[in-house]
Amino acid sequence: MQSPKRSTVHVGVLVDTEDSWGRNIVESVCRFAQSHEWTLLLSPRDRHGKLRIPNGWQGHGVVAALRNRALVRHVRELGVSVVDVSSASKREKWFGRIQTDDSARAKMAVEHLVERGVQHFACYAPSIGRYSDQRAREIQAYVSGIGYRCDTYTSKPGQQWLTNHRDVRRWLKKLPKPVGIFAGDPYPARQLVEVCMMNSIRVPDEVAIIAGDDDDLLCHIATPQISSIELASHRIGEAAAKLLKRLMKGAAVPQKPTLIPPIRIRARQSTDLFAIDDDSLKVALRFIREHAATNMGVTDVASACHISRRLLEQKFRTHLECSPAEAIRKTRLEHVRRLLHDTEKTVTAIALECDFSSTASLCQAFQKHFGQSPGQFRSNRK
């Protein structure tokens, strides 16, 4: 006797694939769909080029990046289960949401700049959608929380590039230097790099720039290349598909969004500076970075700087508000995290390469610093 044939589940995906973030989300949704025998309608557009589900579609659910009110209305009219993967529109009770943890993103960005000695902060938030303001608020809150001021640039909706260019130039000229600037994503970050280049403002020596999202093309083709925050977009896509599956089976819509923390900083040339008026500290920080894979000690760093250990400790506390040992430990573990993410080396091999006394020692240090084991981090890469 044949088992009854299951009805096909039809799911629409309204996520733009022009950038790495969108492509990664769509890839994860597709992978989930293949393992659950869903049929996908991928990024359909109307005659105006807007993401829209065509008339007559007989679907059961939608994963969408709800970035404007028109798209929110369109999706609601479909009368199906919906999961949003963006934070650009106001949260409503009828759809679920999986999004990046903006407070974790802000913390990661600001700490990256602080580690480079930055003490002046700014946020470049032109009017490119609600998310720009939201990310700027999180940056402002974190900077204020650690005792610094954050200057913020905003623009009026629809403001033209030439006018914007002049305003941005004036804003940049007024900022205290060196300054670390956060831009919401690679598009405004690249625009900021271009304005600096046109006005002989040196990046990163005078202005260090970090983007709140990573895009392989946009961040690499800029001169200098732009440091960015790599988001867990694969995880967002997978979590969205899993939530949609539950909603299509009748589960209640969660009334709070699921927050997914970013993966890591992709450090590039735009933040390659040590904004510290102390030559010994610059030597120390560069030595720590260049020897991240070794079991260096504070005495090794002091010797490289030709100063006493006690003086080195004082300088770190005064200028960086941490000890040399803390800086060494963090840099070393960041190096371990890069190897876990970028290679397929075993944890044991990485422990040997980075001069840990044992695999267990590496795992314990990693767990304490990042709140998850090396295995958990690696499994969450995608």
Image: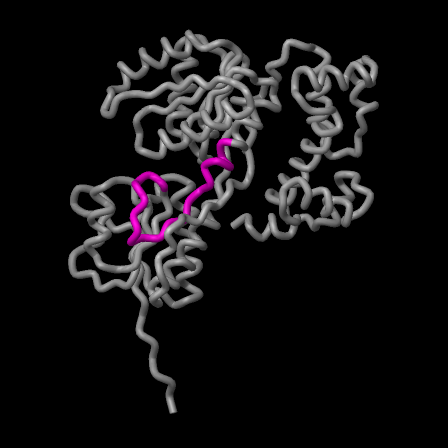
Q: Is residue 271 left or right of residue 173?
A: right
Residue 287 location, quadrant = top right
Q: Residue at x 62, y 39 (%)?
A: 338
Q: Residue at x 53, y 12 (%)?
A: 178
Indicate yes or no whether the magenta region holds residue 189: no
Q: Residue at x 73, y 46 (%)?
A: 364
**Range covered by the magenta-colored residues:** 87-106
Q: Does 242 appear above or below 296?
A: below
Q: Does 139 appear above or below 279?
A: below
Residue 163 location, quadrant = top left
Q: Does 309 appear above or below 106?
A: above
Camera-side residue of 124 and 314: 314
Q: Give the image's coloring scheme.
A: one colour
| Image coords of residue 70 (percent x, y) | 20, 43
| Image coords of residue 342 (percent x, y) | 60, 42
Indicate yes or no whether the magenta region holds residue 98: yes
| Image coords of residue 201 (percent x, y) | 46, 10
Camera-side residue of 116 and 325: 325
